[in-house]
Image: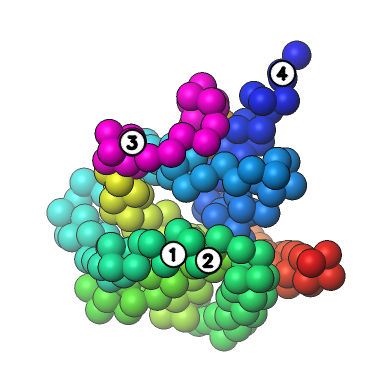
Amino acid sequence: MISEKHLHPIVLGVVQGVTEFLPISSSGHLILIGQLLSSTDQGLLFDMTVNSATFLAILALYYKKILKKSLMAKIILTSIPTGIVGFLFQKEIASLTRNTDVVILTTFFFGIMLGISEYFSSKRKTVKLFSIKDALIISLFQPLALIPGTSRSGITITAALALGYKRKDAAEISFMISLPVSIMVAIKNIHDLFKGVEVILPTNSYLLGFIAAFITATITVKLLLKWLTTRTFLPFVIYRIALATVMLLLT
């Protein structure tokens, strides 16, 4: 039987794996569910650990496509603004935005934005038409994902839909451009370990969270792509609005 101290990181790992690539905000869910499971915040180090697991899941699924030089250059390009903003404002992001008020606001607002893009998008373009111009435009939206509740996949899918990409292709673009940012997060994760960052949870909790996140992320990506071949993002829009409403009522 799984003990409570082991269940906590496994649940958070599953939450990360499921929500990282769905347009509903993984960081927001980690904060909210973490608070429900324990009075102690699991900390930014744990969040970065499970984020690294989802990065490896995408790398395993898309490495063949990513190795194409032209696509790789565009993927790297999309990460530059996020890297700059994250570096300059890392303390503010870590301390000022880890609260439910911010999560409620961003969950609702960017859910509405996703709905607008879903409704008005022409949905004609494919990944093969992913241009440098489109990469630049999407790169300007991605730094917003540093705010919990925004959803990195949500904001980049919203941007891709607005640029006219088909739903499945918008999702695949979002998955692939997550890699450079995830690499930067992983590097910072390793740096913090050697620097002596505060380890809030037991050491094995990080491993359990990592494994749970990797497995669930792989499954989630495959299921989402299958879903988008015949269905829309509307359920995710409704979910975000409903979640924000419930959180508002409970706070």
Which residue sits furthest right?
A: 249
Image location of residue 124, percent across then percent down: 45, 75
Residue 190, by quadrant, is top left
Disc 2: which residue: 97
Residue linked to disc 1:
93
188 left or right, relative to 223: left
Residue 160, quarter of picture? bottom left
* Separation of marks 1 and 4 at Cα, in angstroms: 34 Å
Q: Secondary structure at mark 4?
A: loop
Q: How many marks?
A: 4
> Could you tell me how far apart the alpha carbons at marks 4 and 2 are, in whole angstroms?
32 Å
Measured in 3D between alpha carbons, the distance from the residue under mark 2 to the one under mark 1, in whole angstroms, is: 6 Å
Residue carrying label 4: 2
N-terminal of the pair, mark 1 or mark 4, is 4
**Which numbered disc, 4 or 2, marks the residue that appears first in the sequence?**
4
Query: From mark 3 to mark 1, how far is it between C-alphas?
Result: 20 Å
